[in-house]
Amino acid sequence: MAQQIHWFPGHMKKALNEIEEKIKLVDVVIEILDARAPLSSINPEFEKRINNKKKLIVLSKSDLADPIETKKWEIYFKNSGNSLLVLNLTDPKAEKLITQEVNKLGEEKHKKEISKGMKPQPIKTMIIGVPNVGKSSLINRIARRNAAGVQNKPGYTRGEQFIKVNKDFILLDTPGVLPMNYEDKKHATNLALLGSIKEDILPNDELAANLLKYLSKYYPSALENRFSITDLSDPIEVANKVASFRGLISSGKPDIEKAYFLILKEFKEGKLGRITLEKTL
């Protein structure tokens, strides 16, 4: 049986309760998943609370993911009947694409309002996602201002806030919330590699070993350009080489811990190439 990873700080429980309450107010839910690990970044707790709301899935950080794998995930989600966008959240076109999709999902609501002789009301939209998938970056892009705090660490956004995008579109931001635990340790490991779970939950040596094992199988040349390393089979040997290559020396010896940290950091930043941690089912 897979070892469970427990991670559910008090503020996340509170946030989940608030999301459950506020979701009654919205017409469309935008769920952001990291394109590098789409299944791992799904929070089943959200799915239980969305009910019959119209939903748009956004695969974020597509600029960091393997484009071949992203195309497969795009087909997977569309075949599951979901509205889907694949986005690099820094792309200036992101705002227009999101607005178009939200308007499509809100057409039925507007038609009902018009049929009742009402003026069409703005589409209320909630953005949900686990920490660090790019929610705040997306909000800032489509709201064209620094509306939500952006910080590259999990759990930074606090509370909810309504943000007017335009006369037809209102956003409700929510904090990133992780599931109460992960029965599948691989999902937890993937999220830790992406920076959605704090580093102290899983140790860097374990994370780096998992990453190197995966890279060795699917992206064996990932460290070649950055560190001139082609054999990824032994994590300790790789760390030694990285430390020596980058001058990470402590007490006259290669600093293995700093090397692990560097490997993980460069992966998160996309410096090891465009890598996807999950294959389609």
Image (cartoon, helix red, strand yellow):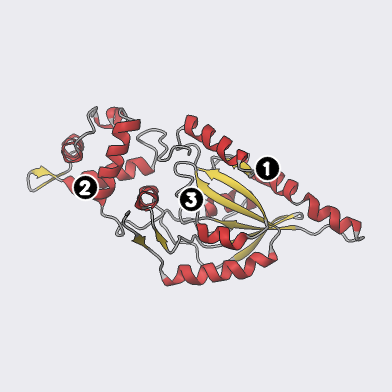
Q: Which residue is mark 3?
A: 133
Q: Mark 3–mark 1 contact, CB under 8 Å?
A: no
Is label 2 in a helix, a strand or a loop? Answer: helix
Report the disc number at residue 258: 2
Left or right side of 41 for 79: right
In this view, the residue in front, 16 or 158, is: 16
> Three-letter amino acid code at disc 1?
Lys
Where residue 22 sits in the image (x, y, percent)? 63, 68
- Real-space Cα separation, disc 3 to disc 2, in angstroms: 25 Å
The residue drawn where x is 70% and y is 49% is 102
Q: How would you rate the neighbour count of disc 3 (Cα within 10 Å): few for under 14, some for 14-19, many for 20 or more?
A: many
Q: Quadrant of residue 267?
A: top left
Is label 1 in a helix, a strand or a loop? Answer: helix
Report the disc number at residue 262: none
The residue drawn where x is 54% and y is 53% is 135
Is label 3 in a helix, a strand or a loop? Answer: loop
Q: Is residue 36 above or below residue 169?
A: above
Mark 3 or mark 1, which is nearer to you? 3
Q: Quadrant of residue 161?
A: bottom right
Q: Which residue is mark 1?
A: 96
